[in-house]
Structure formats: C-alpha cells, structure tokens
Amino acid sequence: MNPVLVEVTRGDTLESQHRGAFCVCDNAGNVILSQGDIDLPIFPRSSIKAIQALAMMECGAADAFDFSDEEIALSCASHGGEVQHTGVAQSMLNKMGLTKELLQCGSHWPMNEEAGRSLAMEGETPSPLHNNCSGKHSGFLAYLKHMKVTPKGYTEIDHPLQQAIKAALEEVCEVNLDDAPVGIDGCDIPTWALPLKNLAWGFAKYATPEQSFSNERASAVKRLTHAIFAHPYMVAGKERYDTTLMTAFKGKVFVKIGAEGVFTAFVPERGLGIAVKCDDGAFRGAEHILTAVLEDLGVLSKDDFIKAGVEDLYATQLKNRKGKTVGEVRRAY
Amino acid sequence: MNPVLVEVTRGDTLESQHRGAFCVCDNAGNVILSQGDIDLPIFPRSSIKAIQALAMMECGAADAFDFSDEEIALSCASHGGEVQHTGVAQSMLNKMGLTKELLQCGSHWPMNEEAGRSLAMEGETPSPLHNNCSGKHSGFLAYLKHMKVTPKGYTEIDHPLQQAIKAALEEVCEVNLDDAPVGIDGCDIPTWALPLKNLAWGFAKYATPEQSFSNERASAVKRLTHAIFAHPYMVAGKERYDTTLMTAFKGKVFVKIGAEGVFTAFVPERGLGIAVKCDDGAFRGAEHILTAVLEDLGVLSKDDFIKAGVEDLYATQLKNRKGKTVGEVRRAY
C-alpha cells in the first residue's frame, strides 16, 4: 500500500490526506529515489503528450507546416481552453488548410472556468478547439496529412497513428505494451498502462536526449523541450501548476500533468526523470508529491519557491470565501 | 488506517481508489455498521447545516418571518448558486427587510458552472447570494433579527449565534466540544471536529425526533426534515447527489454533503443515522461510500437505483469527451 505523501489541514488539524507513489530514475533505468509501488502499471494519461508528439516531429510534419514553438508546445498541452490556446490551435489548422471539425477529440467547456464564462458572454458554445487536447489532436492531423495517412478512425487503437504512438512509448519507456492494460482516454485515444518506474525512466531519457536516443529522436525531443520551456503558458494556462512552475524556474524542470493524479517531469541539468501517481486521482495530491520530490532531489528548495513568489506551489494556503487563510496543502513526509 | 471503499476503473483496470470510514448508529448511540476509524474527530463542514439551522427554527424566527418550506430547505443548503437558489435567498432577505450586503459568507462564482456562465452572460458578477451558503446565512440573519442580537461579528466563534450552534451540535451529537479541534469554514464560521460515531448518532436522533428530543426541538427537526424532503432541489441543485437521491426516493433518506468528502444521512423508517468521511476529501468517494452503506443496510438496492433511473448514483459511468463509456466509479468492498 502506498504511503501518505500529502496532507490537507484546517487550522492545526489534519482534514484530508493523499496517498501515492513516485519514482525518480536516471537514463540507465536506475531508481534514484522512490516511495510506494513503482512496478504497478498506471495509466499515464496526458502526462505523456510529449511522447505522443514524437510522431509529428520525427516525420518532419512540424517543419513542413512551419509550426512555431508556441504551436509545438500546444501539441503537448492539456490547456485551459483560453483564447491564447484556441488561437494557436486554430493557427495550426490554418497552416494545414484544415478545419476544426476534423479534430476527433470532442468538445467541452474550457477547463479554465473564467475562459468558459468569457465564451458564454460572447454567446458562444465550445468547439473541439476548446478541448484541452486540441493542440495534440492538431499535431495528430499534421502527422496524418504529412504522411498521407487517412485521418479516418485516427483515434482507434488499430490506426497507424496510435500504433506509432504505442511504439514510441515502448521505445522511450523501455517497456513492451502488447499485454499491457489499455483504456480509452478522455479525448478518445487509447491509453496504455505502464509501471511508474518505466515512466520515470523514459523521462530521464528525455532529460538526456543525446545520450539516450538516435539523432533523429534526440533532435525531436530537444525541439519539443525547447518549445515547452519557451512557452509554458501553452501547455496548461492560467493558475496551473505546470505553467506556474515552468515560468518561475525557466528551463530547470519540465513538468506535465495527467488526469487522475499523474505527473511526469524531468530535470535536464541532473539527467533525471520523475513520475508521480496520486492514488485517489487528486491533482492537489500529485502536485504536492512532485514538489516534495523536487525538494528532496535538491532541485528546488523551499527558499527557491518563496524567492520566485510561487510559495503556494510549495505549501498551498487554503483561503475561504472571505479571503482568510484557513488551512494548507503540504507534503506529509 | 481506513480501508479502500471506492474504486475508479478505466477499461478493466483499476485507475484510482478512495479510502474512508463510515458509521451507522441508532438513536441510543449503538453502532450498527461501520468501517474504518469512527473515533477520530473529523470536520463535519456543511454536512451539519440542518443542525446549524436549529437556532433559527427553535427561536420562532422562521415563523415570525413567514418562511416557506423552500426557504427553510435553503437554510440547510450547499446550493449551486442557480437562479432558483438565489431567488429564494433574496426572498428570505426581503421578508426580513434586509439586503444581501449583510450576508457575511463572502461571494464566489456559482458552484454550478452552467449557472456561472449564465450569470456572466448577463454581464453580472457573483454576489453573496451566489455563495453556496447564502441560505444558511440568511437563516442566521433571521435568528439574529428575531432575537435582537447584533449581527456584528456573527461569524466569529465568540458570537452568541456560533455559541448557540455549538451547544446544539453538542446536544444533538452527544459530544463535548470544549477541547475539540476547531477550524474556520469556507463561509467564515467555525467548524468543530467530532468523531464520525457522534455525527452518525446525532442524525439517528434526527431520524427519530419524538423519541430523541424535547417537544420544541423535535418540532424544529420535523419541520426542517419536511421542508428538505419536499424541496430537495433547494439543498443542492442540478446534477448533485443529494438532490438526485432525495428526488428519486422521496422521504426515504435524508442526505447532506460536506466539503472534503463528508456526508451525513438518516433513514426515518429505520431510525438510523449515517456519517461518512472520504480520507482524501473527494466528493465522488464520499458519494459512493454512502451508496454502498445504503445498499448494505437494505435501504436501497441496486435494482431500486436502476428502476428510479438514477443508476449513476449506484455506479457512475465515466464518459469521455466523445460520450463513450470509458470507466466506472463504484464500491470496492
């Protein structure tokens, strides 16, 4: 059973708690730090979008359509559906001469509630552009168009695109997924479960692309990383952990959230990859587990968070409706 | 450590899980059914609004201001901030000749996101009426005006209103709170922690008011219960567990959610009280724990949920953005 890693207090009293597991690996697959079960397969969900984007990068589609760094970053995003995000997704489609109706991710009101209200104020309803995965799906369409592969059924497990994604995930994370548990993700594509250890290993390789990959893949990984570090707003958005952390500590840590309490991360200067799963699926749990891991690795200290003005990522102050601090979310170990 | 009571699957695979505790008591305080730690004090949060409303009922304020059943139900609500709710809160204030500026609960965008977007479409921003606790605070103002007690500082722990609430909680739940952990709730009033067992005991007494209380209190409890059973939309709102369950099974079970994964409930026909706490604070966890308890007590069967067309309360089907069923939230024991 996984340990309690995060606690939520009210006044001086424990109110709730989050259990979970994490793993830190180097690019040889050595476990540097871990807690909990790192061998149990977990669904990585959106935390592997930077792996799912490899097909687009490696086939030359991003260059063929002249995608900007912002657009490349959005192809790895779980974005808030803010106008900044939908505009960039639309721009990707424009460059390909495609329309949003081709995006097979489905529609939902923007994850960012303020963006949802703004949309409603304009008398609009959400389109697939507002789906948090619209950048990823635009990247999928770029791959398909450039490779002259039919977009028909591109979210299905047997489609060449999903098989290419599976192969990339297997290679990057050093895992065979033929018998892995598989589910359907929120945006309708398959999600294969893999052990936390392999997820951390894969991102350790992302931290050290030249040592870990062929020239072609290393080049793709470096461009994806460069684009995300340059435009952290694109991968998440307003008041999101990913964006706030990567904006405050530019180039120091790559972080990517996944649904149901998953995080992947890597630290280029240390060559380390990190994977986190909060047992109960809570984002606040996953975020504070990741913060604790970064602290324990000596990558970011409490002082670093305070100096950068993002102390809430270190220990989130819970405010009530009158603005009074009534509790805290923080590491529990 | 509390057991795993709820599981979240994707495909055939476990993705997340929720631990927690529950207790079922009769009105003598006998534990009929339980799992987990029922002696650890937990913050009941909004799950005790029907106890917090006793002061208003017992002093005669509700009658003096001619509050309707809808208004009485709203005084026990954590509502969605929908127009139905804000209208009733405004009506309570009108009957007292007071304005919403006196409500000290603070403002927030409606909990119901659709209601928030509707508000934005009208070019409005939230007022204290949209706060999910506006009915409760309107009830507080009724008590204060009727009793000629100053509203100044009415959310403070030393104010006579909060001390009256504390005394009612102690009497109903058979617990002394003088040394209990205390925190500040979302709407700025104190919240005292008490064991799950006492919370269940208190609501067993609500299930059997004539056996458990003085005539005055029994009468207040019966009117509160009657109002909530008659107007379940008032206590929560659209697509909320409380409202859906009480609408489907009219008069069978009283249920009330509290923040951070708490539920209280009682079953009048069985004379039983129930209290639930999900360790990690998740609503979905607390909801499915309560469903499982109702099933185990023989109060509601899986078939009952299906026949009433509310099978999602029994096992929630998780749909993705394309409307495809991709997983389930369900009892795990």
Image (tube, coloured by chain):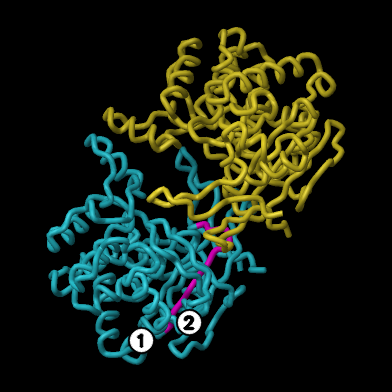
Chain colours: A cyan, B yellow
Q: Is residue A164 above or below residue A184?
A: below
Task: Specify whether residue A277 is painted magenta.
Answer: yes
Q: Earlier in the sequence, mark 2 or mark 1?
A: 2
Q: For the residue marked with disc 1, what is the amino acid?
A: Thr
**Residue B195, visible in the rendered structure:** no
- The subunit carrying tag 2 is A
Q: Quadrant of the N terminus of chain B?
A: bottom right
In percent of width and height, residue B66 lies at 57, 8
Name the residue nearer the viewer: B246 or A3: B246
The residue labelled by disc 2 is: A175
Q: Identify the mark at residue A208; answer none if there is no mark.
A: 1
**Quadrant showing the C terminus of chain B:** bottom right
Residue A97: quarter of image: bottom left
Q: Nearer the viewer, mark 2 or mark 1?
A: 2
Name above or below for residue B22 compared with residue A147: above
Q: Which mark is residue A15?
A: none
Estimate the x, y position of residue A314 in percent, counting from the top left.
Answer: 47, 63
What residue lies at 14% left-to-right and 63% top-to-bottom?
A96
Q: Residue B84 falls in which quadrant of the image?
A: top left
Span of residues in magenta: A272-282
Is A43 contained in the magenta span?
no
**Is residue B300 depicted above or below B322 in this figure?**
above
In this view, the residue in front, B129 or A213, is: A213
Residue at x 71% of width, y 20% of height: B221
Which chain is disc 1 placed on?
A
Q: Hey, which quadrant is residue B149 in on the image? A: top right
